[in-house]
Image (cartoon, rainbow, N blue to C red):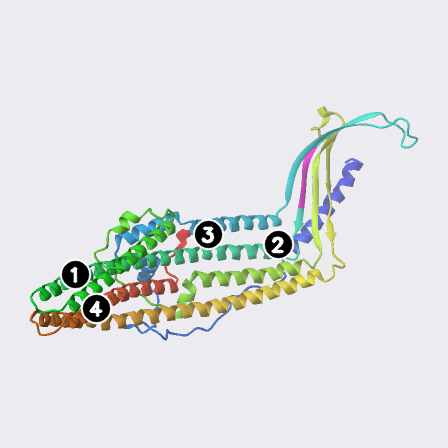
Amino acid sequence: MSNVSRRRVPVRAMVLATSFALLATGCTTLGPDYRSPHIDVPSQWHEAQQGHDGRGEFSAAQQEPLRTWWRSFNDPVLDRLVDAALAGNQDLAIARTRLTQARAERIQVAAGLLPTVSVGGVGQALRSSERLDWPPGIGGSRTWRAGFDASWELDIFGGTRRAVEAADAQIDAVTDDAHAVQVSLLAELAADYAMLRTAQARLAIAQENIRNLTQGEQLAERALAHGLGTSADVAQARAERETAQALPPQLDAEVARLSHAIGVLTGGFSGDWRDLLARPSPRLPVAPSLPLSMPSEVMRQRPDVRAAERRLAAATAQIGVAEAARFPHFSIPLSLGTTASLLSDLFSGASLAWSAALQTSQTLYDGGRARAGVTAAQAQADAARLAYARDVRLALRDVEDALTGLNSERARQLSLAAAVGDSQLALDRATRLYRRGLSGYLPVLTAQRAANHARDALALSQGGEVRSAIALYKSLGAGWEEAVN
């Protein structure tokens, strides 16, 4: 073995031994290990659905209706709108691009655990001055080099591993953000559709009311012609009809506005669905019977709560990143290649050259920057923990509010349905008395106004029940599945 070879062996051994020793200590990971916080929630809902004890859990049979809750309304037009929104809504597309970004950023962070390797080459010509005393002029020379350079930042204290942990949690959070966008999108779309159908139902009631008032006006005119009425009766009937005619333009504008909103929510333009939506539905959507889970199960279903918990996990991991920044940094630069004066000798065995080193650096004074970084990371984790607890409480309130609204509308409908029947009986009786000349026309107008108001209020309440059911689905976190990825 040559002297050169004998000198190389200890160097190789030293580098390898040092590297393995460092890698053996690489299991040190600074910072707290994340544990999902436990938050006490009520065991049941205070505002339980009527006919429901508030203690139910999601079963496998109930989960699928929650994921595709809009289908429970049995409305083909709504199904088409939802499909279009899932395919074309811009907000949902933006949320998906943010997920792509988060995944790419995770790859960038994880790359810090691996060596960086580059390849290159150089051809250099040099001529030294012959007028120098030292070093003596050597004339011209050429150097050729080709090879690999590598650098490996050793994650001795786990800072990079904690950064990867934070990036993984951030991916989960952004994924749940996309789920939350989808939940809100479908709820807004369905609510707009319900309001549009409600406006159309009210428009039909208003138009029928105008026809009835027109007939009443004609009845008053005939009574006046036969000496059974007065000109005041005719004037009152005409004024009532003209007042009623002011409502349809307002409802037409409401239908148009909601149609425009639906067009944008589905990823299109204002008028894309106008022709389809202009055809009134034979009935308002009917709110279905809703599955109701325990509060703790809702917390696992709500994507906004899930996202808050994942951001807490990411913030906790960042504490380890900040703590590792206070400790020494170790790296191994490596170089392997060939060097020769003649290009023809560049790839010969004798031209092989390599180098390896162990580098370390430690900041001695930074004005308290690193310590402040740890304090800031801990404060950020504390804020994320508080935000998670807040979001849990807000989610529970959303469900309670939705249950209150749904129960209220259902109780209201019972009274309004009775009012519709009673007001129609009163109108029929007042009309018969007027036809016989046994009363004036004012009781007819009063009864007509009451009957129309009751029917209009019932239509509003039916639409309100549908919107309350949609709000309950939204508060339960329904309307997403893993396919959003």
Query: How many other residues sit within 10 Å of disc 1, few (<14), some (14-19) or many (≥20)?
Result: some
Inter-mark Cα distance, 1 to 4? 13 Å
Q: Amino acid at mark 4?
A: Arg
Q: Position of residue 422 (x, y in %)?
A: 17, 73
Of the two numbered discs 3 and 2 on the same chain, state the one appearing first in sequence. Answer: 3
Q: Visible in this render: residue 286?
A: yes
Of the two numbered discs 3 and 4 on the same chain, state the one appearing first in sequence. Answer: 3
Judging by the rendered image, the residue that carries numbered circle 3 is 95
260 left or right, relative to 307: left
Residue drawn at 30 percent across, 61 percent down: 61
Q: Nearer the viewer, residue 50 or 26?
A: 50
**Residue 372 picture quarter:** bottom right
Inter-mark Cα distance, 3 to 2? 27 Å
**From what the image shows, is residue 186 above or below residue 6?**
below
Provide the major secondary structure of the magenta segment: strand
Of the two numbered discs 1 and 2 on the same chain, state the one appearing first in sequence. Answer: 2
Inter-mark Cα distance, 1 to 2? 80 Å
